Image (cartoon, rainbow, N blue to C red):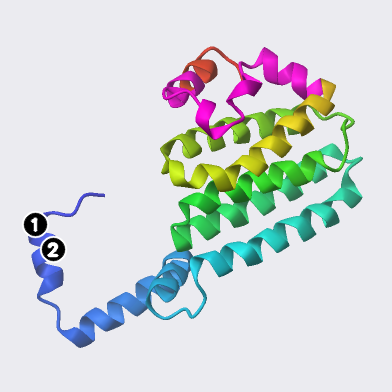
Amino acid sequence: MEYSKEFKQAISAFSSVEKDRLIIRLLKKDRILSEKLYFELIDPETQDEKRAQLEDSVKEEVAAASNYIKNAKHFLRLIRKISAKITEHVKITSDKFGEVSLNLLLINEILALATHFRDGYKLYIYLLNKIFRTLVLTQKLDSDYFIELNVYFENLHESILKNTELAQLALQHGLDLNWLHPENIPEHIAIILKDLKSDGFLR
């Protein structure tokens, strides 16, 4: 929805008390916005501290999800919930580095569970989509972050090579494993991803 000049002026005409009441009402209906404002205004924890806490949570929750590793559908459902927490963290803290590092951590923790997943096609396609997405996001980051991300990408590269099924799917769906290094990500990776999806890959 676009807000007209007249609408903005009408809002500006509210008294301070009316504005405060309106803000509180809106915040009650939008938990993410409420937590974002809390983080930006008064939260004593920093972005780095919140990321570190979530890193621990990701590891713990993937380990717990491993109890359902033989039930591919349920396992993937649990993984999606963990991924949703990362997305929420990014919305609240605007943590662009964490959006990459946390997703790479999630992928690496999953692949550390096994070199083969029974009925794992949907999981692998999900991971390949996430890998491509992290490549796109990494390419947008300042290169100063690349050193910190190298270890995540190196672990990912090794994990894929150990997993024959995933390695073959990666090749079939256009993922060049040489890209799993921040310095080697093509500048037009977003276009590559868009074209692959248009051609029916990564589904």
Residue 78: x and y in percent read 75, 50
- Asked whether residue 186 is in view, the answer is yes
- SS assignment at label 2: helix
Residue at screen point 18% across, 85% down: 16
Identify which residue, 61 or 33, lies in the foreground: 61
**Horizontal side, residue 125 vs residue 141: left or right:** right
**Horizontal side, residue 4 vs residue 73: left or right:** left
Real-space CA distance between mark 1 and mark 2, rounded to the nearest whole angstrom: 5 Å
Residue 2: x and y in percent read 21, 49
Tell me if mark 1 has few (under 14), some (14-19) or many (20+) residues whose alpha carbon lies within 10 angstroms of its own.
few
Looking at the picture, which amino acid does disc 1 mark?
Lys
Residue at screen point 59% across, 31% down: 181
Q: Are marks 1 and 2 in contact (CB under 8 Å)?
A: yes
Q: Quadrant of residue 34?
A: bottom left
Identify which residue, 97 or 192, lies in the foreground: 97
**Horizontal side, residue 71 vs residue 183: left or right:** right
- SS assignment at label 1: helix
Point out the stretch of residues depicted in magenta.
165-193
Residue beneath disc 2: 8
Image position of 72 with respect to 86: above or below: above
In reply to whether residue 38 is colored magenta, the answer given is: no
Q: Which mark is residue 5?
A: 1
Residue 182: x and y in percent read 54, 34
Give the farthest residue toward the bottom. Answer: 17
Image position of 198 with respect to 34: above or below: above
Looking at the picture, which amino acid does disc 2 mark?
Lys
**Horizontal side, residue 172 vs residue 88: left or right:** right
Residue at screen point 79% across, 38% down: 111
Residue 188: x and y in percent read 42, 22
Q: Main secondary structure of the magenta part?
A: helix
